[in-house]
Image (cartoon, coloured by chain):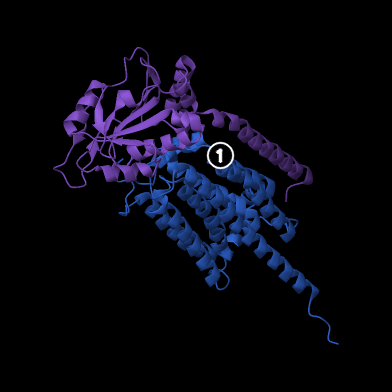
Chain colours: A blue, B purple
Amino acid sequence: MNGLQWWCSAQTLAWSWVPRPFPGVWLLVALLAGLYWALRRTAVEAAPGHGGSPDRRRKWAWLGGVLALWIALDWPVGALAGYLASAHMLQYLLTALVAPPLLLLGVPDGVWRRLASRPGAIRFLRFLTHPLIALAIFQLILFYTHLPSVVDRLMVTPLGSFAIDTLWLAGGLVFWWPVVAPVPTRPRFGYPLKMGYLFLATVLNTMPYAFLTFGELPFYGVYELAPPVGLLGPHQDQQVAGLLMKVGGGLILWTAITIQFFLWYGREGEAEGPAPAA
Amino acid sequence: MKPNHERSSIRGTGRIASLAAVAVCLGLMPVACRVEAPERAEAEERARDTGYRGIYLADAGPRPDFVLTDMRGEAFDLRAQTEGQLVLLFFGYTFCPDVCPVHMASLAAAKRGLSVDEQRRMRVIFVTADPRRDTPERLREWLGNFDSDFVGLRGSEAEVDSIMLALGLPAAIRDTAASPDYTVGHASQVIAFPPGDGQRVIYPFGTRQADWKHDLPRLLNP
């Protein structure tokens, strides 16, 4: 466990504030930067002349998504996630709830247009990102990846830890797709339904929160038996993890609900048109 | 453009596939909940056989007979001063980065779950394997972080090693020449001596608070 690790995982070594490299995380960040360049090229090819190149907001959104992933997976947060359940939860929030919507918002318009012209892909996406299916997939991933038996088995190896992170990112992309992505078009899934969808997610979030916060004993062997970091005992660390899920997750989801509300309000205003002059 | 009947057939297949996917995931839930790590399964099996999740040794002889110095600098006679009590004995050192603080934290948490009377009938004894650095003040401060009733004992390195060997544990390895922040190799198990002689239960590293919660009532009333 002492040598170079390609991905962060739980350790039996005492925690150290000396930075450690995780080449797998750096490779992922480089791949995402490369993917953006490829998407941009696709967008330009799809609409040469105008409209293909992404606007500044989309660039910043993609950058924000990559940054969130980088913070979540690299040292120190990623490494601490092998010692503290609370750091593991922060990693979950960044990987599943922050990075995915930003990455989806960062996709250039031209790429969406190109995707919309592919019936096979649309059929598949229409099924996968149907709000009920997307919510079910996301909640099942949330449930499975927080089970003590799963965490204790997977977090101890880089491959297992990578599997959890990948599931979170994939689940997050599926969950946020109906809210953020313009393809496939779902005219009936308007702003009020999007708000309801996000609200339902906040309610479903409560189950694992309660399980972590009000549990009598530490659930995760990997964190209970990890070399101590700081002053928190394993039980308090688990309670902080639960609160982080409730408060941090709630904050992200309610921010998204608020944004949807203002978008809805703005569109209603536009539809009504300017007030007639007296 | 696909004809209407074909599109509705695709939609129907999609619905069935989605229901099947959700059903498979829901079906796997109880399986995933029941999957246990091998060491947990072993502890459960031991509990079924002996009533303890720790490793039970019958006819283990009397509890060790030694006198060391406690944190106030007074002699502590283990056999005489713990008669009729449950003793949880551990050899470690306060600069230990992993095993020792984890064991002490688990024992402190488990002790808090007992009644006041039960707490009075148990003694956690921490014998330092590193008496050079573990001064009485250091022991008191470090153990106090976990529980102020935990007893810290000191002796010479030779005394402590001979006690460990008598208990069937390897002697401590102190690499004092390596650096002032040297580590000490030591046995990682807590040894429980229930009240009355003849029984011993071993708790290796990996013993969790849930295991202590399960075993402590029985250790107190064997």
Q: Which residue is mark 1?
A: A215
**Residue at the extreme left of the image, as rendered:** B177
Q: Residue B71 is drawn in which quadrant? A: top left
Give the residue at x 54% y 52%. A244
Please tell me whether mark 1 sits on a helix, a strand or a loop. Answer: loop
Amino acid at dot 1: Gly
- Height in image: A98 above or below B173? below
User: The C terminus of chain B is located in which quarter?
Assistant: top left
Q: How many callouts does the rendering have?
A: 1
Give the residue at x 69% y 67%. A262
| Residue B95 placement (x, y as % from top left) | 28, 43
| Residue B23 placement (x, y as % from top left) | 66, 34
- Height in image: A126 above or below B208? below
| Residue B55 placement (x, y as % from top left) | 39, 20
| Mark 1 crowd level (few <14, some 14–19, many ≥20, 10 Å Cα) | some
**Residue at the extreme right of the image, as rendered:** A278
Give the residue at x 52% y 57%. A99
Give the residue at x 84% y 83%. A276
Chain assignment, label 1: A
Observer-nearest of B26 and B187: B187
Residue A182 seen from this side: no
Q: Name the side, left or right, on which A222 lies relative to A127.
A: left
Observer-nearest of B45 and B62: B62
Residue A256 seen from this side: yes
Q: Residue B60 is drawn in which quadrant? A: top left
Q: Name the side, left or right, on which A237 lies relative to B156.
A: right
Observer-nearest of A142 and B7: A142
